[in-house]
């Protein structure tokens, strides 16, 4: 190989990489590198390769609303007690206004404003509203007025309910006022929001929204900061060139609304940018049942990675990779 | 036995007695009787026996809100689409106003107003607010202003969410915009509300509340009309006397917020009132895990039933029971 490569595998990305983060800190010397390459992002479509240069952060929480110590008969108590399922719905309904804006006070205070040039670039190369809706399989968009759907999912933060649980969930009905209900909440963050601060604001807001007739509890699963990758980094230029070799067309630079916890860790601990060379397609049903991968992209992706190694080796700025490869060759 | 007895068993009461209702209609002759006795109600406490003379009706439904055809990645789509879980919460949050009143238009139009004498009787013999809260294990009541908790659960209708389901329900978080969410709804009805009409009003209201960014569907499980039993019926008098024998104290007449589907069927098909001689206690955790039955009430209940048969036999107004018993004696 023309450059030295270190492989790092983990299986906990979806739960916030709780073990990989301290591992990277402990193994800083062993992991030292010029750039990290990760394939966990999407292209815009078949033959429309893309390199991701921005990720949203993520704050993963569970909100629980509790009423009575155990379920009660809904005939005997329905109408006299604040049903926790209803109270939970009432709280959740107050997280957004009618225009899709998040109602948590100070939530937008640190959200970075992007200049016209950046938004124009996004509008030019990014997915159009109609394309996003088609990929999602829905007829109408929703969300913060004044932003395209691509912008709403990348440069704007979002509060999303990912799960609801409470009371009877089997077939038919059951006559109960359930004792408790809970919602899984996924807050997507953008520069320069900080997960810890947003968590504090969320907790304070839920506290205010919780009526005196119910109790609420919040459990935090994980926090991930938003991430940006310098598009002008030599390894990014190498990746740009590599896609031409793999796909026959140049890629575009796109932002992703997703989150990858260790990207900031690599930057902070190793001083290395993460080159997000992902080969998924928008209709791959990511995180859904029957997730798929388009096989031609598997082979084009391999080709792109081979080209990338060649490109990296040809760039004198990426010294460590070259030097280590040379050392290894000497040692070999 | 001093009277003739016919026993009828069913195991479908909780799903609206779908088979017992047509069975009663088909077997009218075989089931002919003066009164029906059923033990499916509560006392007010240990040594505080009660005969139930009113039941609320019940309308059991499921409301489903649908967004995309399958789950989507919440990073990639969160903020650009109307999350069905959020949309469901928003719809449910609009079913009540801040004072606990149901916001379905015309919902209260047919609700019967009870005179001061009836409400005064209820206040005198029925459970107090503090007692209801203690039995429920909650600190504060909730609901329609202007009514006691006992009234809110008996002479006033209620809309109750008995189940919430959507998206991820396991441990931790999952980064999805779920495709669909649903709520089980239990509407308790009072005289003179009709389940079919309330179902129409509910469906029309949900239709109005459903935003253009989501679709909603309603499935009806069953409908039960509210029921009233004449407190002056000879069989009720017999029951009243019987409790003295079984418990040593006279019972009070109470309303229940629960529903028993066949009570109206017995009245309409057989012309017979249902004497609701139940022996459950308020802390029996009815419909909840670890449901119990207070064993002394089992034996006092048996004693009460023996007394009831003797009392019924002594009342010449209850002719059919007596005549049939006599016929049987002759035949025997």
Image: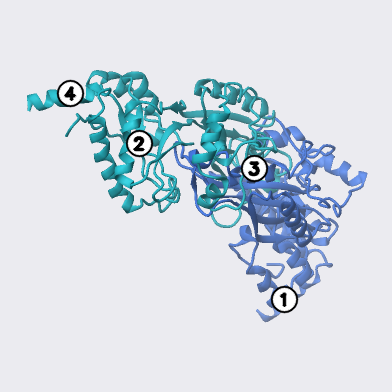
Chain colours: A cyan, B blue
Mark 3 touches mark 4? (CB < 8 Å) = no
Instruction: State the separation of the CA atoms marked 1 and 4.
Output: 94 Å
Dot 3: what SS?
Answer: helix
Is disc 4 surrounded by few (<14), some (14 to 19) or many (20+) residues within 10 Å?
A: some
Residue A254 drawn above or below residue B49: above
The residue carrying mark 4 is A324
Q: Position of residue B115 (x, y in %)?
A: 92, 47
**Which tag is nearer the camera, tag 1 or tag 4?**
4
The residue carrying mark 2 is A240
Instruction: State the separation of the CA atoms marked 3 and 2.
Output: 44 Å
Rendered image: mark on residue A268: none
The residue carrying mark 1 is B28
**Which tag is nearer the camera, tag 1 or tag 3?**
3
Same-chain check, marks 4 and 2: yes
The residue carrying mark 3 is B89
Q: Chain of mark 3?
A: B
Dot 1: what SS?
Answer: helix
Q: Position of residue B197 (x, y in %)?
A: 79, 60
Q: Is residue A23 left or right of residue B298?
A: left
């Amino acid at each position: 190989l023309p450059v030295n490569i270190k492989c790092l595998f983990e299986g906990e990305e979806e739960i916030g990489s709780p073990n990989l983060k301290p591992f990277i800190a402990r193994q800083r010397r062993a992991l030292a590198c010029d750039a990290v390459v990760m394939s966990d992002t999407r292209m815009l479509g078949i033959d429309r390769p893309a390199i991701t240069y921005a990720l949203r952060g993520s704050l993963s929480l569970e909100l629980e609303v509790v009423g009575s110590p155990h379920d009660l008969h809904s005939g005997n108590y329905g109408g006299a007690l604040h049903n926790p399922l209803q109270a939970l719905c009432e709280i959740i309904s107050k997280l957004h206004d009618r225009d899709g804006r998040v109602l948590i006070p100070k939530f937008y205070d640190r959200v970075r404003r992007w200049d016209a040039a950046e938004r124009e670039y996004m509008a030019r190369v990014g997915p159009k509203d109609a394309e996003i809706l088609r990929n999602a399989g829905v007829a109408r968009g929703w969300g913060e007025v004044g932003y395209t759907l691509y912008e709403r999912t990348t440069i704007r933060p979002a509060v999303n309910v990912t799960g609801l649980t409470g009371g009877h969930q089997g077939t038919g009905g059951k006559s109960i006022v359930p004792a408790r209900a809970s919602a899984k909440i996924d807050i997507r963050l953008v520069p320069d929001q900080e997960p810890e601060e947003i968590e504090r604001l969320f907790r304070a807001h839920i506290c205010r929204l919780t009526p005196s007739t119910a109790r609420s509890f919040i459990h935090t699963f994980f926090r991930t900061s938003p991430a940006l990758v310098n598009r002008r980094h030599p390894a990014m230029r190498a990746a740009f060139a590599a896609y031409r070799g793999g796909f026959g067309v140049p890629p575009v630079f796109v932002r992703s609304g997703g989150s990858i916890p260790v990207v900031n860790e690599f930057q902070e601990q190793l001083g290395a940018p993460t080159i997000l060379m992902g080969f998924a397609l928008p209709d791959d049903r990511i995180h859904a049942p029957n997730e798929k991968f388009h096989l031609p992209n598997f082979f084009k992706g391999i080709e792109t990675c081979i080209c990338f190694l060649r490109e990296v080796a040809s760039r004198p700025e990426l010294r460590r990779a070259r030097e280590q490869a040379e050392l290894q060759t000497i040692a070999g």
